[in-house]
Amino acid sequence: MNRLLVPVHANDHIQGGADAEWTLVEYGDYQCPVCGQAYPILKQLQEHLRHRLRFVFRNFPLRQIHRMAEFAAETAEFASAHGRFWQMHDLLFENQEDLESELLFRLTTKIGLSADELQQSLVSEIYRDRIDLDFRGGIRSGVNGTPTFFINGVRHDGSFDFDTLLRSIAEAD
Amino acid sequence: MFMSSFAQSLIPLTGPGSGVKRNKILPVGSVAPQFTLFVTPNQTLSLRELLGRPVILAFYPADWSPICGDQMALYNEVLPEFASYRAALVGISVDSVWCHAAFAAARNLHFPLASDFEPKGQIARLYRAYRDADGTSERALFVIDRNGIIAWSYLSPVAVNPGADGILEALDKLTGKTMG
């Protein structure tokens, strides 16, 4: 049984309170089509469980097979630096099929941030270390592909359809 | 789990989660069998060329199958981490060099894939990681120390991607490095 070795921390991207009964951590890649399929299911789960579920997203870009994964992750981190992480996170998954540089700049402008500033941060790779930290922690916890989920710190190895995830959550300690 | 209750009744278990399958592959402390295999149509790789630093051998059933793809794609991403231990990674399956070449190109892999093709599965058999019924190798991992002794090994269920955490823990122990 694989366990999450990096507990939820202050620098994580978190939706929901620390007093929630369950914490679902996703290691994901914005260019991974399977993560794209999981996205609406996670939204459904959040709606269904509301304050009883805390959701955490961590970066796990497969850079060698997904050319845009790192840029997308850095764009979301850029948005995060301006307090708009979840807006960008959602937009990236909702527009996954158009994931190209042009989209990153368009979405940045759309949420009221500066495309020039994004450009500078991508060139200087200032968010890369933060993404690496997520990635390396994930590897150590046994993340073996994307998406990988941890429910209350234990890796969820089953499928991720709504019913299966809900059942695993309900059964988690 | 994967064994019938009949088989379980015949084979004593040696610990939690262990069973005949887990004990099958060449164990820790064994001398790693030497090999020389083609890694490209005209280039071979020998284990002895790599010794002097840790070697990770990743046997996997087949190029192209979805799980193997994920596993090799994952190791490809973890290469910088493996490199920080000066460890060399070699993937091994019974696929031909041409198949490996196409697979490596499609997945953008940056480590060698050795072809255990003729005689088929010979090296997998030496590591006791061959599946006679399927004609492929197991999904089995070995970490070999700088002197050529198996320091860690793991037999994964064929359908499960074992990830890289076990390999990194084994490298930690070998090199005295702590998780960073």
Image (cartoon, rainbow, N blue to C red):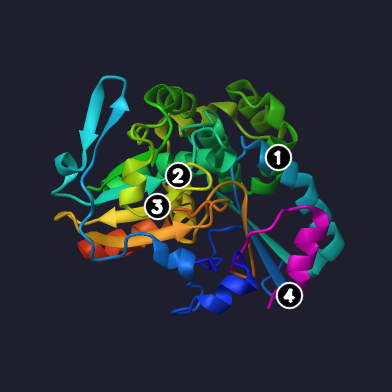
Label at residue B60 = 2
Q: Badge 4 is on which residue?
A: A21
* Residue A77 point in image, percent of width and height: 55, 44
Q: Chain of mark 1?
A: A
> Which residue is drawn at the image coordinates 32% and 53% (left, top)?
B127
* Residue B157 point in image, percent of width and height: 53, 57
Rounded to the nearest angstrom, the CA distance separating label 3 from label 1 is 36 Å
Quadrant containing the C terminus of chain B is: bottom left
- Looking at the rendered structure, the secondary structure element under dot 2 is loop
Numbered range of the magenta stretch: A154-173
Q: Earlier in the sequence, mark 1 or mark 4?
A: 4
Q: Badge 1 is on which residue?
A: A36
* Residue A161 point in image, percent of width and height: 78, 52
Rounded to the nearest angstrom, the CA distance separating label 3 from label 4 is 43 Å
> Which residue is drawn at the image coordinates 14% and 55% (left, top)?
B147
Rounded to the nearest angstrom, the CA distance separating label 1 from label 4 is 26 Å
> Which residue is drawn at the image coordinates 69% and 58% (left, top)?
A158
Q: Earlier in the sequence, mark 3 or mark 2?
A: 2
Rounded to the nearest angstrom, the CA distance separating label 2 from label 1 is 28 Å
B61 displayed left or right of B38: right
Amino acid type at circle 1 is Gly
Amino acid type at circle 3 is Ala
In front: mark 2 or mark 4? 2
B29 displayed left or right of B119: left
- Looking at the rendered structure, the secondary structure element under dot 4 is loop
Label at residue B129 = 3
Q: Are marks 3 and 2 on the same chain?
A: yes
Q: Are marks 2 and 4 in contact (CB under 8 Å)?
A: no
Residue A163 in magenta stretch: yes
Rounded to the nearest angstrom, the CA distance separating label 2 from label 4 is 39 Å
Q: Chain of mark 4?
A: A
